[in-house]
Image: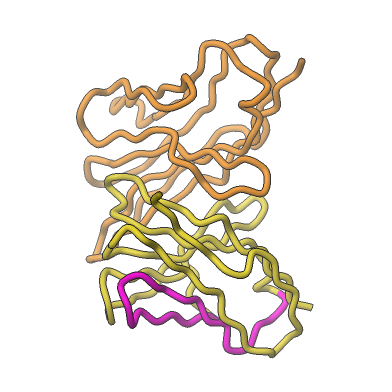
Chain colours: A orange, B yellow
Amino acid sequence: AQSVTQLGSHVSVSEGALVLLRCNYSSSVPPYLFWYVQYPNQGLQLLLKYTSAATLVKGINGFEAEFKKSETSFHLTKPSAHMSDAAEYFCAVRDSGGGADGLTFGKGTHLIIQP
Amino acid sequence: EAQVTQNPRYLITVTGKKLTVTCSQNMNHEYMSWYRQDPGLGLRQIYYSMNVEVTDKGDVPEGYKVSRKEKRNFPLILESPSPNQTSLYFCASGEVRTGAFFGQGTRLTVV
Protein backbone atom coordinates (compact mmCIF):
# COMPACT_ATOMS: atom_id res chain seq x y z
CA ALA A 1 0.00 0.00 0.00
CA GLN A 2 1.09 3.53 -0.67
CA SER A 3 1.88 5.95 2.14
CA VAL A 4 2.50 9.66 2.54
CA THR A 5 4.55 11.51 5.15
CA GLN A 6 4.19 15.23 5.68
CA LEU A 7 7.00 16.71 7.74
CA GLY A 8 5.76 19.23 10.26
CA SER A 9 2.20 19.35 11.50
CA HIS A 10 2.49 23.14 11.75
CA VAL A 11 4.56 25.53 9.63
CA SER A 12 4.75 29.25 10.35
CA VAL A 13 6.07 31.81 7.86
CA SER A 14 5.97 35.58 7.61
CA GLU A 15 3.82 37.27 5.03
CA GLY A 16 5.89 37.66 1.86
CA ALA A 17 8.28 34.84 2.76
CA LEU A 18 8.79 31.56 0.93
CA VAL A 19 6.37 28.76 1.75
CA LEU A 20 7.77 25.22 1.74
CA LEU A 21 5.60 22.28 2.78
CA ARG A 22 7.28 18.89 2.66
CA CYS A 23 5.80 15.64 1.42
CA ASN A 24 7.46 12.26 0.93
CA TYR A 25 5.68 9.25 -0.46
CA SER A 26 6.18 5.57 -0.87
CA SER A 27 4.75 3.84 -3.89
CA SER A 28 5.46 0.59 -5.68
CA VAL A 29 4.26 2.02 -8.98
CA PRO A 30 4.72 5.39 -10.72
CA PRO A 31 2.64 7.60 -8.52
CA TYR A 32 -0.16 10.06 -9.03
CA LEU A 33 0.45 12.78 -6.44
CA PHE A 34 -1.79 15.58 -5.25
CA TRP A 35 -1.85 18.56 -2.96
CA TYR A 36 -5.17 19.65 -1.48
CA VAL A 37 -5.96 22.72 0.60
CA GLN A 38 -8.64 22.96 3.27
CA TYR A 39 -9.76 26.36 4.49
CA PRO A 40 -11.57 26.58 7.84
CA ASN A 41 -15.02 24.96 7.72
CA GLN A 42 -14.57 24.06 4.07
CA GLY A 43 -14.10 20.93 2.03
CA LEU A 44 -10.87 20.00 0.27
CA GLN A 45 -9.88 21.86 -2.86
CA LEU A 46 -7.39 20.49 -5.36
CA LEU A 47 -4.29 22.70 -5.57
CA LEU A 48 -2.29 20.71 -8.09
CA LYS A 49 -1.53 17.20 -9.29
CA TYR A 50 1.35 15.21 -10.75
CA THR A 51 0.41 12.52 -13.26
CA SER A 52 3.80 11.59 -14.80
CA ALA A 53 4.06 14.49 -17.21
CA ALA A 54 6.24 17.50 -16.29
CA THR A 55 8.05 17.12 -12.97
CA LEU A 56 7.39 20.75 -12.02
CA VAL A 57 3.68 21.21 -11.58
CA LYS A 58 1.99 24.57 -11.29
CA GLY A 59 -1.26 24.90 -9.43
CA ILE A 60 -3.75 27.50 -8.34
CA ASN A 61 -3.03 30.52 -6.13
CA GLY A 62 0.66 30.66 -7.12
CA PHE A 63 1.59 27.26 -5.66
CA GLU A 64 3.82 24.75 -7.39
CA ALA A 65 5.37 21.40 -6.55
CA GLU A 66 8.29 19.45 -7.91
CA PHE A 67 8.27 15.68 -8.26
CA LYS A 68 11.66 14.18 -7.41
CA LYS A 69 11.70 10.46 -7.96
CA SER A 70 15.20 9.96 -6.50
CA GLU A 71 14.07 11.57 -3.25
CA THR A 72 10.47 10.24 -3.37
CA SER A 73 9.37 13.78 -2.62
CA PHE A 74 6.67 16.14 -3.81
CA HIS A 75 7.22 19.35 -1.84
CA LEU A 76 4.84 22.28 -2.20
CA THR A 77 6.20 25.81 -2.56
CA LYS A 78 5.03 29.36 -3.04
CA PRO A 79 7.52 32.23 -3.48
CA SER A 80 5.65 34.79 -1.40
CA ALA A 81 3.13 33.92 1.30
CA HIS A 82 -0.12 35.80 1.61
CA MET A 83 -2.39 35.99 4.63
CA SER A 84 -5.09 34.19 2.64
CA ASP A 85 -2.82 31.12 2.34
CA ALA A 86 -3.41 30.22 5.98
CA ALA A 87 -5.07 26.80 5.82
CA GLU A 88 -4.51 23.07 6.23
CA TYR A 89 -2.61 21.40 3.40
CA PHE A 90 -2.76 17.72 2.55
CA CYS A 91 -0.47 15.72 0.33
CA ALA A 92 -2.01 12.58 -1.17
CA VAL A 93 -1.03 9.68 -3.38
CA ARG A 94 -3.32 7.61 -5.54
CA ASP A 95 -3.66 4.12 -4.17
CA SER A 96 -4.91 1.87 -6.94
CA GLY A 97 -3.93 -1.61 -5.84
CA GLY A 98 -6.25 -4.61 -6.00
CA GLY A 99 -8.90 -2.97 -8.14
CA ALA A 100 -9.47 -0.19 -5.65
CA ASP A 101 -8.97 3.44 -6.48
CA GLY A 102 -8.64 6.03 -3.78
CA LEU A 103 -6.40 8.54 -2.16
CA THR A 104 -4.02 7.93 0.72
CA PHE A 105 -3.51 11.19 2.58
CA GLY A 106 -0.76 12.53 4.76
CA LYS A 107 -1.73 13.81 8.18
CA GLY A 108 -1.76 17.40 7.05
CA THR A 109 0.27 20.55 7.64
CA HIS A 110 -1.29 23.61 9.16
CA LEU A 111 0.18 26.71 7.52
CA ILE A 112 0.28 29.82 9.70
CA ILE A 113 1.05 33.20 8.17
CA GLN A 114 2.54 35.81 10.48
CA PRO A 115 1.83 39.46 9.61
CA GLU B 1 -21.57 24.25 -11.62
CA ALA B 2 -19.82 21.03 -10.61
CA GLN B 3 -20.91 20.13 -7.11
CA VAL B 4 -20.75 17.45 -4.46
CA THR B 5 -23.49 18.10 -1.93
CA GLN B 6 -23.55 16.56 1.52
CA ASN B 7 -26.35 16.75 4.05
CA PRO B 8 -26.52 17.53 6.85
CA ARG B 9 -23.48 19.75 7.45
CA TYR B 10 -23.70 19.31 11.21
CA LEU B 11 -25.31 16.52 13.22
CA ILE B 12 -25.41 15.65 16.90
CA THR B 13 -26.92 12.28 17.74
CA VAL B 14 -27.03 9.72 20.51
CA THR B 15 -25.32 6.36 20.66
CA GLY B 16 -27.22 3.66 18.80
CA LYS B 17 -29.60 5.87 16.82
CA LYS B 18 -29.36 5.04 13.14
CA LEU B 19 -28.45 7.90 10.83
CA THR B 20 -27.76 8.54 7.17
CA VAL B 21 -25.51 11.18 5.64
CA THR B 22 -26.44 11.88 2.05
CA CYS B 23 -24.08 12.69 -0.81
CA SER B 24 -25.06 13.74 -4.29
CA GLN B 25 -22.97 14.75 -7.32
CA ASN B 26 -24.00 16.40 -10.58
CA MET B 27 -20.99 15.47 -12.71
CA ASN B 28 -22.09 11.98 -13.85
CA HIS B 29 -19.06 10.43 -12.17
CA GLU B 30 -18.89 6.68 -11.82
CA TYR B 31 -16.51 6.75 -8.87
CA MET B 32 -17.53 8.04 -5.44
CA SER B 33 -16.08 7.56 -1.98
CA TRP B 34 -16.36 8.47 1.69
CA TYR B 35 -13.57 9.64 3.99
CA ARG B 36 -13.39 10.55 7.63
CA GLN B 37 -11.02 13.20 8.94
CA ASP B 38 -9.66 13.10 12.47
CA PRO B 39 -7.10 15.41 14.09
CA GLY B 40 -3.56 14.17 13.58
CA LEU B 41 -4.69 11.32 11.32
CA GLY B 42 -5.52 13.10 8.08
CA LEU B 43 -8.26 11.60 5.91
CA ARG B 44 -8.96 7.89 5.76
CA GLN B 45 -11.16 6.16 3.23
CA ILE B 46 -14.26 4.42 4.58
CA TYR B 47 -15.95 3.01 1.48
CA TYR B 48 -15.85 3.60 -2.22
CA SER B 49 -17.99 2.79 -5.23
CA MET B 50 -16.79 2.19 -8.77
CA ASN B 51 -20.30 2.34 -10.23
CA VAL B 52 -23.97 1.68 -9.51
CA GLU B 53 -24.39 -1.39 -7.29
CA VAL B 54 -20.60 -1.75 -6.97
CA THR B 55 -19.19 -0.85 -3.56
CA ASP B 56 -16.18 -1.94 -1.55
CA LYS B 57 -14.44 -1.34 1.75
CA GLY B 58 -11.75 1.24 2.22
CA ASP B 59 -9.30 1.45 5.09
CA VAL B 60 -11.75 2.01 7.99
CA PRO B 61 -15.14 0.45 7.09
CA GLU B 62 -16.14 -0.93 10.50
CA GLY B 63 -19.46 0.46 11.70
CA TYR B 64 -20.47 1.92 8.35
CA LYS B 65 -22.60 0.88 5.40
CA VAL B 66 -23.11 2.41 1.99
CA SER B 67 -25.36 1.90 -1.00
CA ARG B 68 -25.20 2.98 -4.62
CA LYS B 69 -28.60 2.58 -6.22
CA GLU B 70 -28.22 5.59 -8.49
CA LYS B 71 -25.14 7.07 -10.10
CA ARG B 72 -25.53 10.48 -8.51
CA ASN B 73 -26.13 9.40 -4.89
CA PHE B 74 -23.89 7.63 -2.41
CA PRO B 75 -25.30 7.72 1.13
CA LEU B 76 -23.28 6.77 4.21
CA ILE B 77 -25.22 4.82 6.82
CA LEU B 78 -24.35 4.40 10.48
CA GLU B 79 -26.64 1.64 11.77
CA SER B 80 -25.64 2.02 15.42
CA PRO B 81 -23.38 5.04 15.89
CA SER B 82 -20.83 5.07 18.69
CA PRO B 83 -18.79 7.93 20.16
CA ASN B 84 -15.65 6.79 18.30
CA GLN B 85 -17.46 7.68 15.07
CA THR B 86 -17.47 11.34 16.05
CA SER B 87 -15.59 12.85 13.16
CA LEU B 88 -15.67 15.08 10.09
CA TYR B 89 -16.90 13.17 7.06
CA PHE B 90 -16.26 13.96 3.40
CA CYS B 91 -17.80 12.57 0.28
CA ALA B 92 -15.68 12.64 -2.87
CA SER B 93 -16.59 12.17 -6.50
CA GLY B 94 -14.62 11.64 -9.68
CA GLU B 95 -11.67 9.70 -10.98
CA VAL B 96 -8.73 9.99 -8.65
CA ARG B 97 -6.20 10.38 -11.46
CA THR B 98 -7.84 13.66 -12.50
CA GLY B 99 -8.36 14.97 -8.98
CA ALA B 100 -11.46 14.15 -7.00
CA PHE B 101 -14.08 16.73 -6.02
CA PHE B 102 -14.91 16.88 -2.33
CA GLY B 103 -18.09 17.91 -0.59
CA GLN B 104 -18.19 20.53 2.16
CA GLY B 105 -18.11 17.96 4.92
CA THR B 106 -20.44 16.71 7.63
CA ARG B 107 -19.41 17.20 11.23
CA LEU B 108 -20.90 14.37 13.26
CA THR B 109 -20.94 14.20 17.05
CA VAL B 110 -22.14 11.02 18.77
CA VAL B 111 -22.87 11.39 22.47
The prevailing secondary structure element of the residues shown in magenta is loop
Q: Residue at x 52, y 41 (%)?
A: A90
The reply, left or right, for residue A107 in relation to residue B85 is left
Look at the picture and state if B30 lies above or below B41: below
Q: Is residue A46 magenta?
A: no
Q: Which residues are the magenta region?
A: B63-83
The reply, left or right, for residue A112 in relation to residue A32 is right
Residue B102: image x %, image y %?
46, 53
The reply, left or right, for residue B23 in relation to residue A107 is left
Residue B29: image x %, image y %?
29, 61
Q: Residue at x 61, y 83 (%)?
A: B19
Residue B60: image x %, image y %?
50, 70
Quadrant in which the C terminus of chain B is drawn: bottom right
Look at the picture and state if B9 lies above or below A60: below
Q: Residue furthest right?
A: B111
| Residue B37 occupies quadrant | bottom right
- Near-viewer residue (B102 or B38): B102
| Residue A47 occupies quadrant | top left
Number of marks present in the image shown:
0
Q: Residue at x 48, y 42 (%)?
A: A45
Q: Residue at x 56, y 80 (%)?
A: B20
| Residue B26 occupies quadrant | bottom left
Residue A19: image x %, image y %?
57, 18
- Near-viewer residue (B4 or B45): B4
Look at the picture and state if B47 lies above or below A74: below
